[in-house]
């Protein structure tokens, strides 16, 4: 009897076990545990940086100085990968709040690191040895030196401290800005007569409040409504709500961000924040960007004028001559959709019928399996942050062991990141002990969620985004 009970308990435990692709990941932490782990990872990074800073000049090498700095940053990123990622996907508002706090803590820590004079001196001590390096290694050294310079290490101490304070405040404000948008939840209420042009399946899946239909601001509601609603006032209402998400909280935040960015840029010797940002990018300066945009504008303007005239003609037929003097922000998606139907016989609603999300997912994976010589396998019973999430392993075709993992989190929910993006959670890299750390990433989207009697159908644009 005891043996039977023991076997029953053992089998139940095995059934309940979940697969975690990396010991560094915890996708369902308690908020306090998340911050405890975040602070511990920061403390480990601090200790490692102290060892680099205290090293005698005579023994500095590429491996123990510039490469060590890069490894410390990579270790910290991987050790906190799930902690910061959960800000964008966790179902718990408390966990999202802790993840935002962790992200802010790490961002401010990065400001502190690149404001340290001893680390800058350590890096210069090595660079001044002018050792013969591979192009990749030389690039790393020059990039790290530039990062210290761009943090104000060549400024007088007082101005350097001011720049550091401004940048730490910016980290806090920028995290708050994005969090406000992710946490914002609003909707427009319409009665049935105000839903003209909307497909029946769209109307049938809407929630109700006070006898009216709730149209939310997430992509599965917003885009179909703006594409198909024949009611200009309803489109205007939803467009204004969409473009003013979290505006009440974020207008003041944005003003502070712009002011602090400008002030920090000027202290560092740049005319504007744009000059600062572009210095380390391909464009190099705002003049190059402005020239590129001007060339595009010259080439696209004649085509845009012709297309705008067509949209105005369609609006005149629908709303009358007076209304057709201009195409408003809440008009263009609707009339662009009408233009596709009338001039090109393209009906996005009909095309959706060919793209159920399950079919698109399987075909997309099949394409990349064949193209890249890989094998994708869905993991049963994975450790995830929401039941909708799936986990896949990646193998070389015919390979015995996984080489990577990725999550799919495809449907909207309260507090979730509002756009589509790929998040690198754990980076694939060779560790100092020779082991290869397998990468883990996540594809996050906001497609229409399927219901019991209704599949999730993707628009052509969504299919392109998914691919």
Image (cartoon, grey):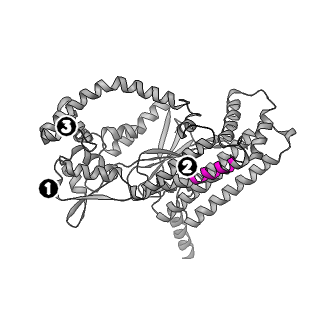
Q: Position of 92 compared to 169: left or right?
A: left
Kindly indicate whether the residue at mark 3 contacts the one at mark 1 (C-beta within 8 angstroms).
no
Which residue is depicted at the point 66% across and 46% down?
73
Q: Nearer the viewer, residue 21 or 2?
A: 21
Q: Where is residue 172 shown, x and y percent of the image?
A: 55, 55
Secondary structure under tag 3 reads helix
Q: Please state which of the two labelled residues, at mark 2 or mark 1, is closer to the viewer.
A: 2
Q: Residues within 10 Å of mark 1 (few under 14, many from 20)?
A: few
Which residue is depicted at the point 82% across and 31% down?
129
Q: Earlier in the sequence, mark 2 or mark 1?
A: 1
Q: Would you say residue 420 sits in the magenta stretch? A: no
Q: Position of 467 compared to 107: left or right?
A: left
What is the quadrant of the C terminus in the image?
A: top left
Spatial CA distance of label 1 from label 3 is 26 Å
Q: Nearer the viewer, residue 317 or 423?
A: 317
**For residue 325, which numbered disc appears in the image?**
3
Q: Which residue is mark 1?
A: 193
Q: In the rendered structure, which segment of residues is drawn in magenta?
A: 159-170
Which corner quadrant of the image does residue 317 belong to? Answer: top left
Kindly indicate whether the residue at mark 1 contacts the one at mark 2 (C-beta within 8 angstroms).
no
Spatial CA distance of label 3 from label 2 is 40 Å
Q: Where is residue 107 shown, x and y percent of the image?
A: 60, 51
Q: Nearer the viewer, residue 322 or 456?
A: 322
Q: Which residue is mark 2?
A: 260
């Amino acid at each position: 009897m005891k043996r039977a009970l023991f076997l029953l308990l053992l089998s139940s435990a095995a059934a309940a076990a979940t697969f975690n692709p990396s010991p560094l990941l915890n996708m369902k932490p308690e908020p306090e545990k998340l911050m405890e782990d975040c602070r511990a990872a920061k403390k480990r990074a601090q200790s490692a940086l102290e060892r680099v800073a205290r090293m005698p000049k005579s023994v500095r090498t590429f491996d123990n100085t510039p490469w060590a700095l890069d490894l410390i940053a990579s270790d910290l990123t991987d050790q906190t990968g799930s902690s910061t990622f959960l800000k964008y996907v966790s179902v718990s508002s408390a966990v999202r709040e802790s993840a935002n706090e962790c992200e802010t803590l790490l961002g401010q820590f990065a400001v502190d690191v690149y404001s340290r004079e001893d680390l800058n001196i350590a890096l210069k001590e090595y660079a001044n040895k002018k050792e013969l390096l591979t192009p990749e290694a030389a690039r790393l050294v020059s990039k790290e030196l530039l990062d210290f310079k761009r943090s104000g290490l060549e400024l007088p101490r007082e101005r350097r401290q001011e720049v550091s304070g401004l940048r730490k405040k910016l980290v806090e404000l920028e995290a708050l800005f994005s969090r406000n948008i992710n946490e914002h939840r609003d909707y427009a209420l319409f009665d049935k007569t105000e839903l003209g042009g909307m497909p029946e399946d769209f109307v049938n899946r809407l929630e109700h409040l006070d006898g009216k239909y709730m149209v939310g601001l997430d992509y599965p509601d917003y885009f179909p409504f703006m594409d198909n609603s024949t009611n200009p006032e309803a489109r205007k209402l939803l467009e204004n709500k969409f473009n003013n998400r979290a505006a009440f909280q974020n207008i003041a935040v944005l003003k502070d961000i712009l002011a602090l960015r400008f002030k920090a840029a000027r202290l560092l010797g740049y005319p504007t924040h744009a000059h600062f940002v572009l210095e380390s990018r391909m464009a190099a300066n705002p003049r190059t960007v402005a020239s590129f945009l001007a060339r595009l504008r010259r080439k696209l303007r004649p085509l845009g004028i012709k297309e705008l005239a067509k949209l105005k003609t369609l609006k005149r037929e629908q709303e009358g001559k007076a209304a057709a003097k201009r195409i408003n922000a809440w008009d263009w998606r609707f009339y662009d959709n009408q233009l596709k139907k009338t001039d090109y016989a393209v009906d996005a609603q009909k095309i959706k019928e060919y793209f159920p999300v399950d079919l698109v997912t399987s075909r997309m994976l099949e394409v990349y399996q064949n193209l890249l010589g890989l094998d994708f396998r869905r993991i049963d019973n994975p450790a995830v942050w929401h039941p909708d999430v799936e986990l896949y392993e990646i193998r070389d075709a015919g390979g015995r062991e996984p080489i990577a993992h990725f999550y799919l989190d495809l449907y909207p929910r309260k507090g979730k990141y509002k756009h589509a993006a790929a998040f690198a959670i754990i980076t694939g890299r060779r560790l100092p002990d020779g082991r290869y750390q397998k990468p883990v990433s996540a594809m996050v989207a906001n497609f229409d969620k399927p219901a019991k009697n209704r599949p999730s159908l993707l628009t052509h644009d969504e299919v392109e985004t998914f691919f």
